[in-house]
Image (tube, rainbow, N blue to C red):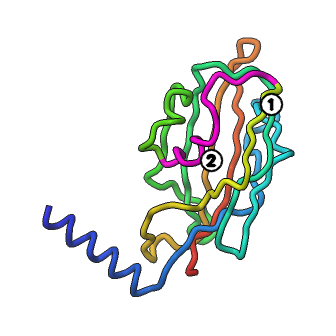
Amino acid sequence: MKNNFIIFCLCILFSTTFGKLGLTVDDNYEKCASPEESFNTLDVSGAEIVTVNDTHSYLNGTAKFLVDLDPPWPIHFYIEKLYGNKWATTGVDRMFEDFCEDMHRPYEPWFKLMSHFKGCPYKKDELLVANMIRLNEFKMVYTPSFKGRWRATIEHYREIDGIRKKDCTRIYSEIAEE
């Protein structure tokens, strides 16, 4: 217990010594599944990530479901950090057998975002509407080791004609001094 308190104090000391760090989410994202294995769940052409004053990132617009999405909804979520020119895994790597069950749990990091939307099931042509939902509002102290480029990958799976297919989206961000 005493060691945890000392580590916590050192983290606070380093974060204040090196200045305040902030997270900025890139305006663009990428699809990361190969054409042979991919399928499209959402049409996100009506949605955008808006960055204001290089410090605040928001999700705005609409996304439309292209298929009926019923539970279970298996998802794999992981975060990587860029070291030099190589992406390295971090401690965040989670697989959910049914994200429908987990999307509105208040202790999950995406709760604040997902609380703006209803839960599963989703019907084809149903819209998710985001009205300037802040993405980088995390109650977290970043130490200097957090500085740099990061990417979050969300893979979800669906069986189509007896073949397991994957939809994959990757979002990039930067943690830097404000």
The total of numbered circles placed on residues is: 2
Disc 1 crowd, CA 10 A, few/some/many (<14, 14-19, 20+): few
Nearest to N terminus: mark 1 or mark 2? 1
Residue, far bottom: 17
Q: Residue at coordinates 64% horizontally, 63% vertically from top-left?
A: 173
The reply, left or right, for residue 123 in relation to residue 154 is right
The quarter of the picture where residue 118 lies is top right
Name the image quarter holding the C terminus. bottom right
Tell me the number on the disc at residue 36: 1
Q: Where residue 65 appears, x then y in whole percent?
A: 78, 30
User: Magenta-highlighted stretch: main secondary structure?
Assistant: loop
| Callout 1 amino acid | Glu
Disc 2 crowd, CA 10 A, few/some/many (<14, 14-19, 20+): many
Q: Residue at coordinates 55% horizontally, 52% vertically from top-left?
A: 79
Q: Which residues lie in the magenta part?
A: 109-124
Q: Secondary structure at mark 2?
A: strand
Is residue 88 shown above or below 99?
A: below
The reply, left or right, for residue 37 in relation to residue 4 is right
Nearer the observer: mark 1 or 2; the answer is 2
Residue in the foreground of this view, choosing between 76 and 117: 117
Q: Which residue is mark 2?
A: 153
Query: Is 51 within the magenta?
Result: no
| Callout 2 amino acid | Thr
Disc 1 and disc 2: Cα gap in Å? 19 Å
